[in-house]
Image: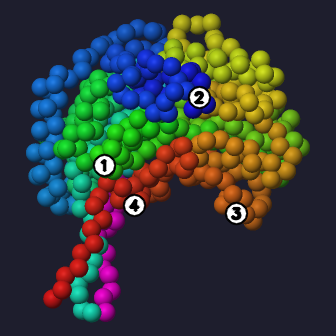
Amino acid sequence: CGNSQAMVNSHYYYLGMRPSIPCGLCRRVFDFCTIKNMPIQSKNPATLEVVKTFKELSKKELEAKLAKSAVAYDAWRKTSFVERAKLMRNLGEYLREHANELSALQTLEMGKTMKSGPAGLVKCAAVCDYYADNTEKILAQEKIESESGEERYVQFDPLGAVLAVMPWNFPFWQVYRFAAPAIMAGNVGLLKHASNVPQCALAIEESFKKVGFPEGVFQNLFLSVPQVESVIRDPRVAAVTLTGSERAGASVASIAASLIKKAVLELGGSDPFIVLEDADIAHAVAVAATARLQANVGQSCISAKRFIVHKKVVKEFTGLLVKEFEKLKIGDPTDTDTDIGPLATEHILAEVEKQVSKSVAKGAKIISGGARLKMKGYFYPPTVLTKVKKGMPVYDEEVFGPVAPIIEFANEKEAIWIANDTPYGLGATLFTSDMARAKRLIPQIEAGNVFVNGMVKSDPRTPFGGVKKSGYGRELSAYGIKEFVNIKNVCIKK
């Protein structure tokens, strides 16, 4: 399959899974039975303290939750948009009121800084508000003109229980951006969260209960890996959505496809950040620093990961980016002055170290950072590499950490070729002062999201997703909510 063992391992650690067999040189898709479980536990990545451990559900407990989900769906699907919207607005208000408290949980479990964390909860509230305000309009019947006097329209009906397999890197946002539209559409939600954020998972489930959603409309499931497959296969589960990586997505989607069940995949990315020679370099650098680190030490699918810079401005860009990175304070994520916290796990840290060292061995040059910090916890500094070429891990692979590889180009054609020279197609950024030029280049970029002179980010009002091995389907906006409805064609002859 062309992937290193380290790459494959990183895909599963992203979802709290650990492969027990070598990379798929002999098989392209891992079966769930070949993946060992990670412990379901809170471990502080800054102090390395194991805070709390949880048990997976027993067979009997899981059956009870699935039965409760089926009962809840039968009632919830019959509620009005007005009833659902009232509860969803309450949920948004709850998230705003408890933003600091909830943010502290993600700081504890995966190291997100308290400086950046509460804003993420406010964004979760915004997605609740968006669907509370807009679902009735989005899912309104669409009348179709008929010449023969028939009454024709398109109706949008819920599907049932939707299983969400979610990662740890944005432990609240990833869940609410699935749950708000799915539940507003009349579905019910089941969550299999990453095994290293169990307290975040419980807090999400509790938030639905606190604001009055009926029992069973949203449930957290502490599952072993084989149990994930059994839930997907359960006839009471109508669809599955996964945010994670190519390998994890392929495994989940293959099971869903074997049962002809709907799946949405939002997978990895190796997003290009293209800086043309006519760009405002100071502005490009300021955005680049934020886009690479994404308030999460670079552990984001939509972080800018390959900086493709015109040779006329590469020296200026590199120097300014190093200055931006070196201004950042690294340390205790609970300190509100800290900009850079730890990576989430020891495995992720080791993987970033390996990708950088192998790239340096192949000729890349470290300009800043480039080595694990000598302090307790999984800390790695923002790192800038130059002389990056195809064939190096930092060019060929998704780097899930604070590493900025800079790749020079000489002309537009070369820049677009480098940008598209990846199996992924999630996001892309283009910096130029010429808007006509930008609009000419946008169709040539193979990505689900293209931002000009700004950082790629999701917004409840706009669709989010990728192409190629970054997945299929869309989240957010009207496009996202329609992924998990039955788009029903109705014709009534009078």
Determine whether the residue tagged by mark 1 lies in a helix, strand or loop: loop
In the rendered structure, are the residues bearing label 1 and label 4 in contact, judged by CB atoms less than 8 Å apart? no
The residue nearer to you, when weighing 467 against 52, is 467
Residue identifier under label 1 = 261
Q: For the view shown, which residue lies furthest in the right direction? A: 312
Residue type at mark 3 is: Lys
Residue type at mark 2 is: Asn
Residue 139 sits above or below residue 86 on the image: below
Residue identifier under label 4 = 478
- Magenta range is 129-147
Q: Is residue 276 left or right of residue 38?
A: right
Let me know if residue 130 is in the magenta part. yes
Q: What distance separates the C-alpha of mark 3 from that of mark 4?
A: 24 Å
Q: For the view shown, which residue lies furthest in the front direction? A: 26
Residue type at mark 4 is: Ala
Let me know if residue 239 is in the magenta part. no
